[in-house]
Image (spheres, rainbow, N blue to C red):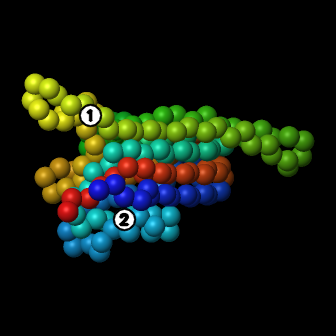
Amino acid sequence: MQRLPMYRNTESSDFDANNNKTVFTLRYDPNADPLDPTDADSDSTMASPKPIAIHAYDFTVAVNCLAEIWQWYGMTENQAKLEEFDLSDQTFLQGFKNSTLAAGTVLLRSGDTNSSQWNVRTLRFRSKRYWSKKHKEYRWVIPPIILSPNKKTMMGFSLKNVGDQDNRSYYTHLKIARWHQAT
């Protein structure tokens, strides 16, 4: 059964150099309360008591600094390593799924006047399937992201200021458009 989309909007003007920010995490936890999609905007971490499949999302970020933006997927015990952008860490690389680089800037005008040039980037994911006449069933071309006890238990969206300037800003908009839970 298709559910209501989940939305999450965040903003911050305290985004320092080499700082990581995790915008949203979704995890499978059999002891959690039932998942309410309307709580996504007020809660940065949500848990589902039933296995969940993510079929489509759009993660849009506007920044005025050089920022790496990524989606990760892994086990709950590896969350700290997955949220820290480190291309030399094996755990991070195994969970590193979708990424882009945004290059916004801030220009110093006369005196103390700043002029921000915002850069907007969007990470998109869509699962895709087709009907196989040979096998008489649907087959996945791009499978959905599954959070369950048999697969990975957590996914999230993070960004890092990879530039060398402090006090930068970002705005994010996450829409998990298509998802469903096992019944």
Question: Residue placed farthest to the top in the image?
Answer: 134
Discs 1, 2 touching: Cβ within 8 Å: no
Residue located at (17% from left, 50% from top):
151
The answer to whether residue 78 is visible is: no
Q: Position of residue 128 (x, y in %)?
A: 30, 34
Q: Based on the displayed image, in which of its 4 quarters is residue 51 positioned? A: bottom left
- Image quadrant holding the C terminus, namely bottom left
Q: Count neighbours of disc 1 (C-alpha within 10 A) and say few if under 14, some if 14 to 19, many if 20 or more.
A: few
Q: Secondary structure at mark 2?
A: strand
Mark-to-mark CA distance, 1 and 2: 27 Å
Q: Position of residue 52 (x, y in %)?
A: 26, 56
Going by the image, does 137 lie left or right of 78?
Answer: left
Question: Residue placed farthest to the left in the image?
Answer: 135
Is 141 situated above or below 45? above
Mark 1 belongs to which amino acid? Arg
Going by the image, does 71 lie left or right of 162?
Answer: left
Which residue corresponds to mark 1?
A: 129
Q: Which mark is residue 46?
A: 2
- Image quadrant holding the N terminus, namely bottom left
